[in-house]
Amino acid sequence: MLSDTTPEADAIRLQLLRQTPIWRKLQLMTELNDMTRIVALGSLRQQYPQAAEDELQRMLADRLLGQELAAAVYGPQP
């Protein structure tokens, strides 16, 4: 249960979630992931305004995947 939600409202939320088709749940997760990437990339652009787009994408990979996995997939950070 959410801390700011009444038990009745939470029960309705859970019922609606259970009734939601899997394709819609996957669509919502994809949208959430896309927004996460957009926000993280925007943060990197503010933090490193002089960085090239490929540098920003590599930094984003570090944030999303972790440095070890990003290095394994994309090679070491230049």
Image (cartoon, helix red, strand yellow):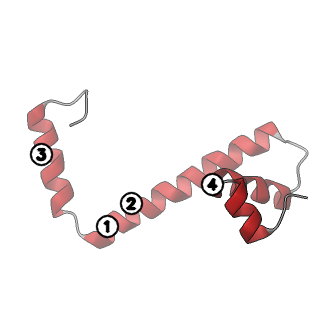
Q: Are marks 3 and 4 in contact (CB under 8 Å)?
A: no
Q: Which residue is mark 1?
A: 24
In the figure, residue 19 lies in which quadrant? bottom left
Q: Of tags 3 and 4, which is closer to the observer?
A: 4
Q: Which residue is mark 4?
A: 64
43 up-or-down from 32: above or below: above
Where's residue 22, x and y in %?
A: 27, 70
Residue type at mark 2: give it. Answer: Leu
| Lower sequence index among marks 4 and 2 | 2
Residue type at mark 1: give it. Answer: Arg
Of 76 and 36, which appears nearest the observer? 76
37 up-or-down from 44: above or below: below
Q: CA distance from mark 2 to mark 1?
A: 6 Å
The structure residue drawn at horizontal position 56% and vertical position 51%, both measured from the top left corner, is 36
In the figure, residue 61 lies in which quadrant? bottom right
Q: Which residue is mark 3?
A: 12
From the viewer's perspective, tell me whether residue 55 is left or right of residue 13.
Answer: right
**SS class, disc 1:** helix
From the viewer's perspective, tell me whether residue 32 is left or right of residue 10.
Answer: right
From the viewer's perspective, tell me whether residue 52 is left or right of residue 25.
Answer: right
The structure residue drawn at horizontal position 20% and vertical position 37%, both measured from the top left corner, is 1
Q: CA distance from mark 1 to mark 4?
A: 24 Å
Q: On residue 28, which mark appears?
A: 2
